[in-house]
Amino acid sequence: MSNNNIICKIVNVTKVFPGVIALKDVSFDIKKGEIHAVIGENGAGKSTLMNILSGVYHPDEGHIEFEGNVVKFRDPRHAQHTGIAMIHQELSLSRSMSVAENIYQGRMLKKSFGFIDRKKMVSECRKYLKSLGVEDIDPRTLVKYLSVSQMQLVEIAKAVSLNAKLLIMDEPTSSLTTGEISTLLKIMKSLKNEGVSILFITHKLEEVLEIADRITVLRDGSYIDTLQKDDATLEKMVSLMVGRNFEKKAHREFIQDYSDREVILEVQNLSSSDRVKNVSFKLYKGEVLGLTGLVGSGRTELLQSIFGMEKMASGKVLINGKEVKINHPADAIKLGLGMIAEDRKEQGMLLKLSVQDNMTIVHLKELSSALQFINKKRSKEISNKYVNLLSIKTPSLKQISKNLSGGNQQKTIIARWLMNQPKILFMDEPTHGIDVGAKAEIYKLIDELSKMGVSVILLSSELPEVLALCDRIMVMHHGQLKGILHHQEADQVKIMSFILENKKEIAS
């Protein structure tokens, strides 16, 4: 292959952080006008590599070549000027600025005498959006009024305006609906056809198979292999990622007979503002109860209302047959409930604290002496126990949590709640944004919790996940509980029928 067809080469790149070798002698190339996926488990080094390519980090060893020249980026702006733009998973737009202002942030178009030419910015912005097939976003709209998918499109339009030759997309579909994902993938193909190279980082391997021309696999900071599209299968990719043969489906002994099961939690006619409307259900001891539905169906709000994070407008909550009042999460915790929130960075992890501190922060009273001194030995022992139990990859308990991969952050949060020995555990999208290996470990953990008698409500947008793990499945739509399916009768068609039939009703 001629080097003329290569836009970017990663050559023997190594990056070391305190206690962690994030990348070790990584080399591969990216062709002009290709969609190149980079996959790997959490902690494989994907994010570190992307940050090096986009000018956030500098390699400790090795170098980057771009269009045949060795480049040493001073910062992300330097990388952008060179032709590399990155769209981060946590979108970096300013919500208080308009779409046009965001696209031209730091390089506002000027009239004579130095005045900002807002009219031209709006016109040019509209042109860039139109080139992506986007005509429903007004450049004058404040970003805070856009949906996540629209923000994603604005980020892409900004990259187009920068004449990016290599566009790095970090988990771009993680917060999008099925329809929005389809739109984004079409735009990615369109950019490819225009000669833009795309580096695509994702945990969604089905999308990789659909759109990627080549797939590079990283594992534990090392380059493993680059697959051609025609040679790639789901099983092959997973095997390369985890370094072992992988069983993708979860296996559980599902509850067949509920007649002798104890009802651990009962919700009666719960309503919360306008997001949850008159929901009633029972949760049995040791049951894994699925909760699914489209984005905005009220699933998260339901769990938050039960847990005391949102105020109930009406309804009752009973635990072990007795009505309880939960006005605050502290009340829920005292009653034996735990909550693993979807947004681990905003509602779960304290990123500046250590792994040990994150695990033990809600257990300080139990770990303290009568004189209120923390028993450091006991704290370390129990933290190590859960690090080993959940296979949390960290160089030490003192590691700052923000330096952990997403999967290991999630397992740290789970460890925190397991220390509390909950009777009931709410898990809101617990496998969101984590790799297949970490998913498998969480699936195994859910099964083990069930066998121990812990009752789990699993909120997940991934129907295969719900079907593989849950004894029963609740389907919500527009704040209402549309039906509950037993495992033996549930499939994707039946679940979606609850939602689609409801849509028709609303439309008529």
Image (tube, grey):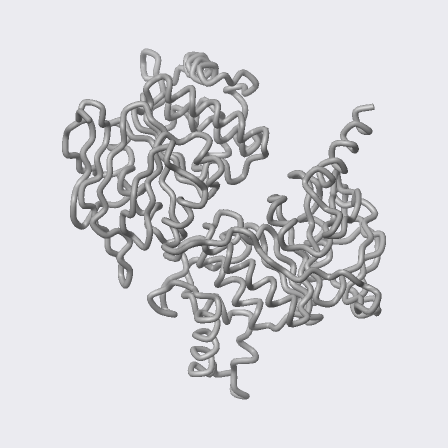
Q: Is residue 359 above or below residue 208?
A: below
Looking at the image, which residue is at 61% across and 73% down?
421
Looking at the image, which residue is at 50% across and 16% down?
133
- Where is residue 463 shown, x and y percent of the image? 63, 44
Give the image quarter of residue 335: bottom right
Work out which quarter of the rendered image holds the C terminus and state it. top right
Residue 86 seen anywhere in this rendered image of the structure? no
Taking 325 as reference, is 51 left or right? left
Work out which quarter of the rendered image holds the N terminus and state it. top left
Taking 163 as reference, is 439 left or right? right
The residue most toward the bottom is 370
Looking at the image, which residue is at 31% across and 47% down?
48
Taking 303 as reference, is 213 left or right? left
Taking 439 as reference, is 117 left or right? left
Question: Is 317 in front, or is 466?
Answer: 466
Q: Is residue 8 above or below residue 287?
A: above
Give the image quarter of residue 55: top left
- Where is residue 11 shown, x and y percent of the image? 18, 41
